[in-house]
């Protein structure tokens, strides 16, 4: 992708590309779904796929943008206070992300001059693999380098998070930006979204593989259903807070507390909260099992997580259910579940080393026959 990016830069801006290009990966979340915005722990792992960005200083007050993946290009005026906000941002398509980033950097008092920025990526967009965070963090790295902003990897995640939540219209948690900015290849990132502390957990690459199965069905994260789940969690939290003064987030709630408040909650809010509270426990159990090499237990937890996302959080789809259930039933698979926000996108399967190709062949054929669609597969660590 680096070569494609360099030639795009040269042709879009009629000038030499910069020496250095910057990369930020997409991620797959192993477990801990829809808990980041409830201050819980999550366990994403970085992919070899992601976004590359190349930037050079440009004309004063002019931002020129080009993407290898998207046709749209644009020139924006840095002197305009709202820099492509409102309707203009919606019309700007992918470009709303780098523009949001400039606004978030300026909010932090960072001086940004005119620049030319080109990006190229190989992540499936809208598949739940965090293409927007990868784009934002790659651009943040490029601007950090170009303007000597002195931002640490965690600072880059925070500014990308601010760009996404304040200027791109998604009330997401910080998992994706942190994964794109600080995760290490070959490791999962155990991130505590309450205090943003993290540690790297080695993946069992000798014994098992992570296979990402893209259902080919898509959703847009800015779509209202994600934000609706966030609001439902807030409603559940408000009820719990009225009954217990020490509760700040759903992270502070145990399954027993929920049962005691159940009669006072809307049924949907109760289901959402139950998922969150139990999913938090599953993350800790999963990490313990991973560190003990108990992959069968990891598989059970993945299956439980999927059922909970399907029945309690209600973010699955028939295609994701089919892929997760069939993958889990294969002899070489420990377990599988939908990964990312849901409503379409990908399933993650934990398979025994050596069983990946059998899974690809069986599931690929069954999915095409049953759902009339092609599934795409990506084996983590399998070359890209
Ligand atoms: C999206 C969001 C994340 C997280 C997941 C669900 O990827 O960007 O912050 O909430 O959904 O776990």
Image: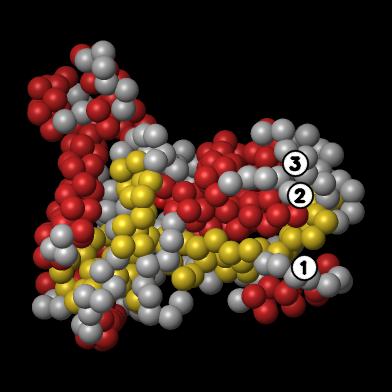
Residue at image location 81% in from the left, 43% down from the top = 78
- Residue at figure coordinates x 13%, y 33% from the top left: 255
Q: Which residue is drawn at 68% across and 57% down?
A: 142
Badge 2 marks a residue whose secondary structure is: loop
Q: In this view, does 313 lie above or below 216?
A: above
| Residue 30 x %, y % | 29, 58
Residue denoted by label 2: 147
- Report which residue position mark 3 lands on: 83
User: Pointers 2 and 1 in contact (CB under 8 A)?
Assistant: no
Q: Is residue 228 left or right of residue 160?
A: left
The 10 Å Cα crowd at callout 2, few under 14, some 14 to 19, many 20 or more, is some
Q: Position of residue 53 (x, y in %)?
A: 66, 63
Please give the residue where the numbered disc 1 appears in the rendered image.
18
Question: How crowded is the residue under tag 1: few (<14 C-alpha within 10 Å), some, or many (20+)?
Answer: some
For ligand 1, tell me if the residue under mark 1 lies within 8 Å: no
Sequence-wise, the earlier of marks 2 and 1 is 1
Query: Which secondary structure, mark 3?
Result: loop
Closer to viewer: mark 3 or mark 1: 1
How many labels, in total? 3
**Residue 160 horizontal/vertical position (percent):** 57, 46
Relative to 366, is 19 on the left or the right?
right
In this rendering, position of residue 327 left or right of residue 171: left
Q: How far apart are marks 2 and 1 (CA)?
A: 13 Å
Q: Quadrant of the N terminus?
A: bottom right
For label 3, the crowd category at 10 Å Cα-Cα, with few meaning under 14, some 14 to 19 and many 20 or more, is: some
């Amino acid at each position: 992708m680096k070569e494609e990016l360099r030639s795009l830069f040269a042709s879009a801006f009629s000038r030499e590309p910069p020496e250095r290009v910057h990369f930020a990966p997409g991620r797959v979340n192993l477990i801990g779904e829809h808990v980041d915005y409830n201050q819980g722990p999550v366990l994403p792992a970085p992919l070899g796929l992601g976004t590359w960005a190349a930037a050079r200083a440009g004309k004063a007050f002019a931002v020129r943008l080009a993407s290898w993946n998207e046709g749209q290009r644009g020139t924006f005026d840095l002197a305009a206070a709202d820099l492509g906000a409102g309707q203009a941002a919606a019309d700007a398509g992918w470009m709303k992300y780098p523009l949001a980033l400039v606004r978030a950097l300026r909010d932090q008092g960072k001086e940004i001059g005119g620049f030319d920025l080109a990006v190229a990526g190989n992540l499936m967009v809208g598949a739940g693999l965090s293409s927007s965070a990868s784009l934002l963090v790659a651009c943040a790295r490029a601007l950090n380098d170009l303007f000597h902003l002195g931002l640490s990897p965690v600072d880059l995640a925070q500014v990308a998070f601010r760009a996404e939540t304040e200027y791109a219209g998604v009330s997401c948690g910080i998992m994706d930006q942190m994964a794109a900015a600080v995760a290490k290849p070959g490791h999962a990132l155990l991130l505590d979204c309450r205090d943003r502390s993290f540690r790297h957990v080695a993946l069992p690459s000798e014994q098992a593989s992570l296979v990402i199965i893209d259902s080919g069905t898509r959703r847009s994260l800015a779509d209202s259903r994600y934000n609706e789940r966030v609001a439902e969690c807030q409603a559940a939290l408000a009820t719990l807070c009225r009954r217990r003064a020490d509760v700040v987030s759903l992270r502070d709630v145990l399954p027993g507390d929920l049962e005691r408040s159940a009669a006072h909650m809307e049924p949907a809010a109760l289901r959402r909260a139950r998922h969150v509270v139990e999913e938090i426990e599953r993350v800790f159990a999963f990490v313990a099992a991973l560190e003990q090499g108990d992959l069968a237990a990891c598989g059970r937890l993945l299956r439980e997580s999927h059922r909970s996302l399907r029945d309690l959080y209600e973010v699955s789809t028939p295609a994701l259910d089919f892929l997760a259930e069939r993958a889990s039933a294969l002899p070489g698979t420990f377990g599988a579940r939908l990964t990312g926000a849901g409503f379409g996108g990908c399933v993650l399967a934990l398979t025994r080393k050596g069983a990946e190709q059998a899974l690809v062949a069986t599931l690929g054929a069954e999915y095409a026959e049953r759902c009339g669609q092609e599934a795409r597969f990506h084996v983590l660590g399998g070359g890209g």
